[in-house]
Image (tube, grey):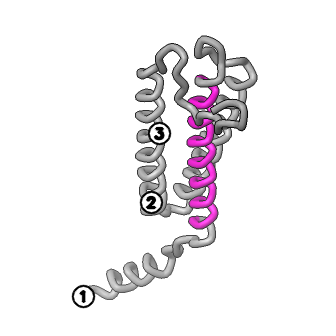
Amino acid sequence: MDAAFVTFVADVSATAKPVNLWGALGCAVAYSAALLATLDAFADLILARDDAPAGKLTPAVGLKFGSKLAAAAIAVVAAGIVLALDANWFAFFALTIAFAVVVAIGVVVLLRHASHPPAMGESRGITPLPTEGNP
């Protein structure tokens, strides 16, 4: 082997920076918080459709839904940028794929729920417990 090649390989291996595990952990927490916010927004939307007259959303519920999704998007993009800047590609792709799969499942459930409206007088939600005067 050439001495210059050995020196080059030694220099390259010495300059390679290690993966920032604390940064990856922080980004994983950000991804999971964004995922929970997204699923919570989907749940709010499903519950609001059952409670709203004629299945329409009130402006407050729409704003709440949109703000949760916006906050989740900001968190995921910021965490993705941090992982990309750290060149932690394994964590970047693993977290992004897991996030996308769970959100896709949530969207499928949301669309499936919206495509089957309840019949007249039927409720999809939790039925109230019977009281003493009302069996």
What's the amino acid at mark 3?
Gly
Q: Earlier in the sequence, mark 1 or mark 2?
A: 1
| Residue carrying label 1 | 1
The residue indicated by pointer 3 is 106
Q: Earlier in the sequence, mark 3 or mark 2?
A: 2
| Amino acid on which the number 2 mark rests in the picture | Trp
The first of marks 3 and 1 along the sequence is: 1
In contact (CB < 8 Å): disc 1 and disc 2: no
Foreground disc of the pair 3, 1: 3
Which sits in the foreground, 119 or 52? 119
Magenta stretch holds residue 30: yes
Q: Is residue 33 above or below residue 57?
A: below
| 91 drawn magenta | no
The residue under the point 47% across, 62% down is 91
Can you tell which quarter of the image residue 77 is in?
Answer: top right
The image shows a total of numbered marks equal to 3
Element at label 1? loop
Magenta-highlighted residues: 24-49
Q: Nearer the viewer, mark 3 or mark 2?
A: 3
- Is residue 75 or residue 57 the one in the foreground? 57
Furthest toward the left, the residue is 1
107 to 100, vertically: above or below: above
Q: Is residue 93 above or below residue 55?
A: below
Q: Is residue 9 left or right of residue 121?
A: left
Give the residue number, with chain letter if any, for mark 2.
89
- Whole-number angstrom distance, CA of label 3 to CA of label 2: 25 Å
In this rendering, would 5 be left or right of 42? left
Image point (52%, 21%), residue name: 122
Q: Main secondary structure of the magenta part?
A: helix
Residue visible at 32% across and 81% down? 5
Which element type, helix, strand or loop, lies under badge 3? helix
